[in-house]
Image (tube, grey):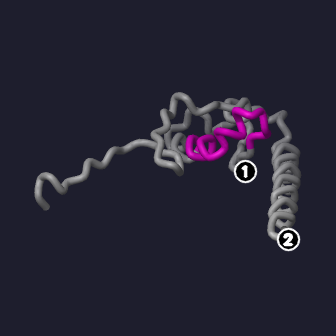
Amino acid sequence: MEDNQRRIIRGGYFSDDGKEINPLEVPLPALCVSCVKYNDAKEETPCLLNRMDQMDKIRNGEKFLCFAYEPKDPLIDKEKVLHEMEEYWDKQNKEYLKKKKSSEVK
């Protein structure tokens, strides 16, 4: 490959539209801080990717969902927290499908 044909490939995190994302600017929900995986080097990338995927929702005050959540505090009822996430997820999906169906009918 000639020098003028080489492409520079940068590492890092990028949004779907190609904009680079600074990991330090990704919101950190309280749920993450209360998780055993918080500050675990092996979990840093998957946790960050999950937060990046929901970044706009977090900034808009919507509920953050993480089905890999493991509470640090044994007094936190993990099953209850996950059940609340599932209910929220179901509600969001029903609303999305309702909007999608109504837009297809038009």
Q: CA distance from mark 1 to mark 2?
A: 34 Å
Q: Is 42 on the left or on the right of 52, as rendered?
A: left
Viewport quadrant of the N terminus: bottom left
Q: Closer to the camera, 38 or 74?
A: 38
**In this figure, which residue is indicated by the disc labeled 2?**
105
- Residue 29 lies, in percent from the top left, at 70, 32
Which marked residue is nearer to the observer: mark 1 or mark 2? 2
Residue at figure coordinates x 63%, y 31% from the top left: 27
* Callout 2: SS: helix
Residue 64 drawn at (x, y percent) = 74, 41
Instruction: Decide which of tag 1 and tag 2 comes sooner along the chain.
Output: 1
Instruction: Name the image quarter holding the C terminus.
Output: bottom right
Horizontal side of residue 11 vs 79, given as left or right: left
Q: Residue at x 86, y 56 (%)?
A: 95
Residue 51 falls within the magenta-colored stretch: yes
Amino acid beneath label 2: Val
Point out the stretch of residues depicted in magenta. Answer: 47-64
Q: Amino acid at mark 1?
A: Phe
Whether 62 is among the magenta residues is: yes
